[in-house]
Amino acid sequence: MNYISLRAIDGHNISQFTVNTIQDQVIPKLEQWGIAVSSIGSPIGKIYIDDEVSFQQQLIELEELCKIAKLLNCDYIRIFSFYIPKDKNFDNYKVQVVEKLQQFAEIAESHHVTLLHENEKDIFGDIGRRCKTILDEVASDHFKAIFDFANFVQCGEDPQNCYDLLSQYVDYIHIKDAVYKDNVNVVCGTGDGQIAAILKQFFQ
């Protein structure tokens, strides 16, 4: 294994670390094992859209995560596009979601880091159409997409249709598979993710 997506260390989320602790405690371990970091799996954007206190805190956290990414020679930070209040129409929150994601993208651009939006279940950008909307409207070279096969399946989406919509933005892929029947993850290649066909297109 040459690369990892760094999400947590010793049970603590990466967002809880500072540049100094990464320098002193984490980099020596990575160097010892000859492992580099391909992306930082942050929780940025995994808050409710109307939680302003948490949003302001995440702006501060993202600044530090961008510095950590540069220290790790890592170009990518995974983020999300906010939970929407229960029983509300997701599409009605598009403007708020885009405005906040643009603030995240501006921070990333100032550090020459790229944010990767993951199509996580139950956030605004959980389906292909809304992922396309935010990627189009944030319109930043520092805001791209992670393509997660399993999450699209678990949202009832057709992965091939989603890839066709998003291919111009996809910079990173999560190799996970799932089945429509039970909405459960399965061994990659045995589910409904259409992984082999889409990977072939991605690498062409």
Image (spheres, rainbow, N blue to C red):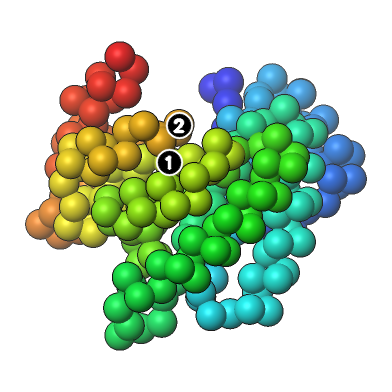
Specify the quadrant of the image occupied by residue 23: top right
**Dot 1 and dot 2 residues touching (CB under 8 Å):** yes
Dot 1: what SS?
Answer: strand
> Which residue is located at x 70 percent, y 50 percent?
107
**Residue 4 figure quarter:** top right
Separation (CA) of disc 1 from disc 2: 6 Å
Q: Return the residue nearer the eye: 43 or 75.
A: 75
Give left or right: position of 80 versus 24: left
Instruction: Write down the residue under mark 2.
Output: 171
In the picture as drawn, the residue positioned furthest to the left comes out as 181
Frontmost residue, 163 versus 18: 163
Q: Position of residue 113 (x, y in %)?
A: 66, 37
Left or right relative to 158: residue 152: right
Q: Amino acid at mark 1?
A: Ile
Question: Is 203 situated above or below 190?
Answer: above
Question: What is the x, y in percent for residue 173?
Answer: 40, 34
Depth check, front residue: 132 or 42: 132
Residue 176 — which label?
none
Q: How many marks?
A: 2
Judged from the image, the secondary structure of the residue bearing numbered disc 2 is strand
* Quadrant of the frame with the N terminus: top right
Kindly tell me whether residue 28 is visible in this rendering. yes
Q: Is residue 150 left or right of residue 171?
A: left
Mark with earlier residue (1, 2): 1
Circle 1 sits on which residue? 146
For label 1, the crowd category at 10 Å Cα-Cα, with few meaning under 14, some 14 to 19 and many 20 or more, is: many
Residue in view at x 66 percent, y 24 percent:
35
* Residue found 55% across the figure and 58% down from its top: 101
Q: Residue at x 44, y 41 (%)?
A: 145
Q: Is residue 168 above or below residue 49?
A: above
Q: Is residue 115 above or below residue 17?
A: above
Q: In the image, residue 87 lies at what x, y percent?
A: 30, 85
